[in-house]
Image (cartoon, helix red, strand yellow):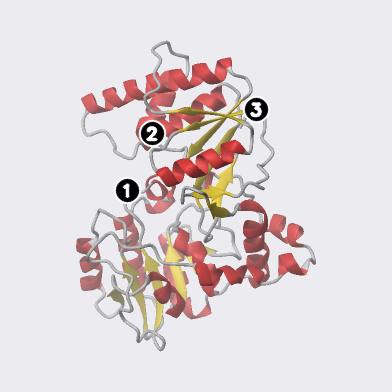
């Protein structure tokens, strides 16, 4: 097999892509400058799908048409390669937006296998999946699968996965007004639900926010439900430290609407706030899964691969949200299921990373790639 990867441009990401491809033998690299005019019946549809998921949405009809053309000729070039090289496997970072989406769609349409890579929510690990990433990954959504896998094996049923907690580090801040400092250290005696906000235009929000739609609506829904929290409780927000889109105005509206029930804390370390909380609420942030390491109940409103009853409390509408907030002091989770699920992620699903000779992260060479289907 020849592993064909789409060059990302980030040295660390390209290092991980190359290291996965090296486990499969032959390697070939493509860039987003790969073009071909001659098209396929699926070209227009795939280009429109790529535009719909692009990180920078078109600003005008002319801009949209230009993007459709670019993704069309990229798709055509990628598709031609996969049609004429039957031993090819497509490898891409993320793979669900823009050019990356066109690349992976071309491979699938040609009947070639795919491998998606992305950062993992577990420290020192990376996602390597033949189906997709995040909500689109190949992990089973059935609690029974993880219980059956764990069986009675103490290495699978025990809390060994919690050892990774000490390696968790909050994301470094790219904003002067959002920090990861000591901040409010008097949280131990307070009762609150912590909401670590996500980047408003991130793929996780744009594609997988479900019934909530967007971050501002999310804040509004939580603010309204905060009125039902038990006496003495509050809802605590923190903006994402890497977001270029400030949410100050929306948060100030929330604070004004519920001055005794809403707190905005952009300075205290994210995991410190997780640790001091009684529960964590999210659309589908990785912090929601990382809150498992702090043995916290987690409430999930959006689409997420860990949105399995027992692991978390799924919320499907505003009425359910109000009920969950009203019963916040009874929030819980299935400890045995979490042990099985998290051990599966650490022992089976997420490969480990190591530092290569060039100082960049690489996927460990003993990686056993998942069995690749003929088509996905």
Q: In whole angstroms, how far apart are the C-alphas of marks 2 and 3?
A: 26 Å
Q: Which mark is residue 98?
A: 2
Tell me whether circle 1 and circle 2 mark residues in contact (CB < 8 Å).
Answer: no
Above or below, comparing residue 252 to residue 148 in the picture: below
Return the disc, 1 or 2, that comes first in the chain's sequence.
Answer: 2
Residue furthest toward the right? Answer: 152
Place of residue 160 in the rendered image (x, y in percent of width and height, measured from the top left): 66, 70
| Residue 310 visible at all | yes
- Screen quadrant of the N terminus: top right
- Screen quadrant of the C terminus: top right
Residue closer to the observer: 115 or 24: 24
Return the disc, 2 or 3, that comes first in the chain's sequence.
Answer: 3
Place of residue 107 in the rendered image (x, y in percent of width and height, measured from the top left): 54, 26
Q: Is residue 233 left or right of residue 295?
A: left
Query: Which residue is label 3 attached to?
Result: 1
Q: Which mark is residue 320?
A: none
- Mark 3, other Cα within 10 Å: few <14 / some 14–19 / many ≥20: few
Q: Secondary structure at mark 2?
A: helix
């Amino acid at each position: 097999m020849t592993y064909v990867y789409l060059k990302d441009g980030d040295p660390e990401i390209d290092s991980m892509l190359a290291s996965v491809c090296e486990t499969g033998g032959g390697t070939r690299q493509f860039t987003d400058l790969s073009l071909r005019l001659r098209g396929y019946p699926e070209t227009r549809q795939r280009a429109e799908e790529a535009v719909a998921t692009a990180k920078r949405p078109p600003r005008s009809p002319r801009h949209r048409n230009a993007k459709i053309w670019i993704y069309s000729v990229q798709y055509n070039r990628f598709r031609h390669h996969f049609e004429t090289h039957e031993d090819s496997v497509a490898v891409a970072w993320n793979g669900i937006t823009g050019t990356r989406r066109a690349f992976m769609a071309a491979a699938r349409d040609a009947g070639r296998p795919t491998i998606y890579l992305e950062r993992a929510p577990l420290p020192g690990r990376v996602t390597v999946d033949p189906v997709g990433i995040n909500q689109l990954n190949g992990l089973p959504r059935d609690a029974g699968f993880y219980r059956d896998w764990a069986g009675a094996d103490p290495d699978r049923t025990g809390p060994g996965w919690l050892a990774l907690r000490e390696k968790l580090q909050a994301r470094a801040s790219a904003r002067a007004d959002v920090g990861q400092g000591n901040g409010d250290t008097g949280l131990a005696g307070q009762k609150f639900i912590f909401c670590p906000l996500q980047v408003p235009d991130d793929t996780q929000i744009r594609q997988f926010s479900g019934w909530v739609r967007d971050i501002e609506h999310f804040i509004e829904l939580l603010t309204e439900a905060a009125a039902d929290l038990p006496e003495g409780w509050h809802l605590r927000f923190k903006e994402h430290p890497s977001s270029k889109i400030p949410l100050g105005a929306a948060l100030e509206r929330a604070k004004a609407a519920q001055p005794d029930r809403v707190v905005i804390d952009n300075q205290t370390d994210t995991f410190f706030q997780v640790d001091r909380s009684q529960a964590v609420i999210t659309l589908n942030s990785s912090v929601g899964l990382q809150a498992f390491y702090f043995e916290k109940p987690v409430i999930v409103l959006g689409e997420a691969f860990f949105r399995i009853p027992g692991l978390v409390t799924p919320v499907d509408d505003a009425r359910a949200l109000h009920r969950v907030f009203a019963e916040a002091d009874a929030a819980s989770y299935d400890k045995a299921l979490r042990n099985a699920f998290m051990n599966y992620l650490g022992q089976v699903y997420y490969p480990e990373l190591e530092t290569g000779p060039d100082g960049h992260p690489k996927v460990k060479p003993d990686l056993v790639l998942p069995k690749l289907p003929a088509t996905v």
